Image (tube, rainbow, N blue to C red):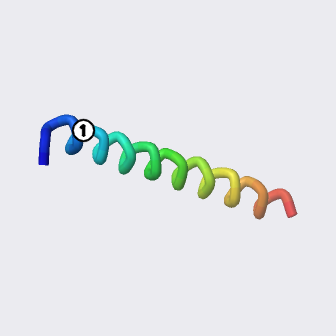
Amino acid sequence: MSCEAAESVEDAVHDNRMFAERAFYCIVNGASEL
């Protein structure tokens, strides 16, 4: 695996983690408003 591929994978994992945290945050706030 090249360094570029490894970096792209890490970026993808980071993006997915940020998306998951953002989605979880929205879900928690939305549930608390119900």
Which residue lies at the image location 87% right of the left edge and 64% below the top edge? Answer: 34
- What residue is at 84 percent from the left and 57 percent from the top? 33
- Residue 5, quarter of picture: top left
In the picture of the structure, the residue carrying the numbered disc 1 is 7
Residue 32 picture location, percent across and down: 77, 60
Judging from the image, what secondary structure is the residue with disc 1 in?
A: helix
22 with respect to 13 (left or right): right
Query: In front: 27, or 7?
Result: 7
Residue 31 percent location from the top left of the image: 77, 63
12 to 20, vertically: above or below = above
**Looking at the image, which residue is at 59% across and 48% down?**
22
Q: Nearer the viewer, residue 34 or 14?
A: 14
Please name the residue shown 69% across and 59% down the image.
Answer: 27
Say which amino acid is labelled 1. Answer: Glu
Asked if residue 2 lies left or right of residue 11, the reply is: left
Q: Residue furthest right?
A: 34
**Quick one: 29 or 20, which is closer to the camera?**
20
Total number of numbered labels? Answer: 1
Q: Position of residue 13 (x, y in %)?
A: 36, 50
Q: Residues within 10 Å of mark 1 (few under 14, many from 20)?
A: few
26 vs 5, left or right, is right
